[in-house]
Image (cartoon, rainbow, N blue to C red):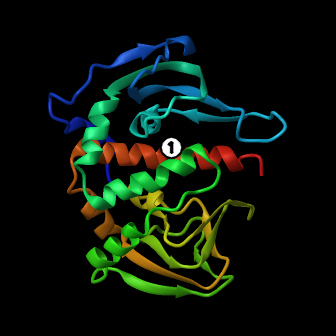
Amino acid sequence: MPIDCEGLIESLPPEVMSTDIVIEQASDITFGDIGFLIRSGKCLLKDSKIYKHNLHGTQTFSQGDSIGFAEVISRRNVEHRYGILEPLTVSPYAGDRLRKEIAGASFLLREVIRYSLRPIFEADRGRPSAVFEDKFFRHHAKLAQRLSIPNGSYLYQIGDESRYFYLIEKGKVALQNEVGATFATISDPECLGEISVIEGRNRTSTALALTDVTVLALNSAVFCEEIAKDSPLSQICLIQVLRRLHLMNQLRYSHM
């Protein structure tokens, strides 16, 4: 079963719940150490660093997305500019509370967040520690399948059912959009397929093996069951980081 962000928000204990505020113009978006969950409305993120030659990329954020979550979790400054398309109703969450929840979460949730943060801010995906690989194998070897994918074959294609969360044990994989353009290249020991698994939707990208690839494939239901053991707020943090990564990938390859 996918993880329901709205249900998680409703299940937050009173001491974690926040009072919604309304933002009507971009100048009212002041961050500090606060991240915002969008409850209604639309805003536009503008990033001049996506392309060379001073071209700009834009991406619309709406209900269910967040502003500043990835930045406060990773203690980074907000560098993007936002424009208001429709007045926003947002729920603010203090950065120290978000970081505390993640620090107390399971190894799997923490590591998926950590691995996902760097490519949000940089076009090149970062490599997690090999400790993640070792612990993942140790904890899930009995529940996961080890699969061999030949060079030039697909792990999955756009529109496929999201049946597995993958950890690459060996090899290199290209992530491609609907016209076959590569927007990210990942290799061992990295994860892939986690965004669509978390949200319970079909694949929105194609994963093509650039070499002979060996992966550990964890059933999507098992992956979600493991994550569901964590606190509601830490699960919300995971969903928001993965949504942000998905939106940044869309932003980066929208011109291809």
| Position of residue 148 measured from the top left corner of the image (x, y, whole percent) | 52, 88
Q: Is residue 43 above or below residue 248?
A: above
Picture residue at 69% right of the left edge, 82% below the top: 152
Q: Is residue 135 above or below residue 149?
A: above
> Which residue appears farthest toward the right when viewing the image?
53
| Residue nearest the observer in this picture, 117 or 234 | 117
Examine the rendering and report whether any part of residue 57 can be seen: yes
Residue that carries the numbered disc 1 in the rendered image: 244
Q: Is residue 250 left or right of residue 170?
A: right
Looking at the picture, which amino acid does disc 1 mark?
Arg
Q: Is residue 94 left or right of residue 130?
A: left
| Position of residue 158 measured from the top left corner of the image (x, y, whole percent) | 60, 65
| Residue nearest the observer in this picture, 25 or 53 | 53
Quadrant into which the N terminus falls: bottom left
| Position of residue 135 measured from the top left corner of the image (x, y, whole percent) | 31, 72
Picture residue at 74% right of the left edge, 61% below the top: 181
Q: Is residue 5 left or right of residue 123?
A: left
Q: Is residue 87 left or right of residue 51?
A: left
Examine the rendering and report whether any part of residue 1 can be seen: no
Picture residue at 59% right of the left edge, 34% below the top: 60
Instruction: Identify the secondary structure beneath mark 1.
Output: helix
Q: Quadrant of residue 73?
A: top left
Q: Residues within 10 Å of mark 1 (few under 14, many from 20)?
A: many
Q: Quadrant of residue 83?
A: top right
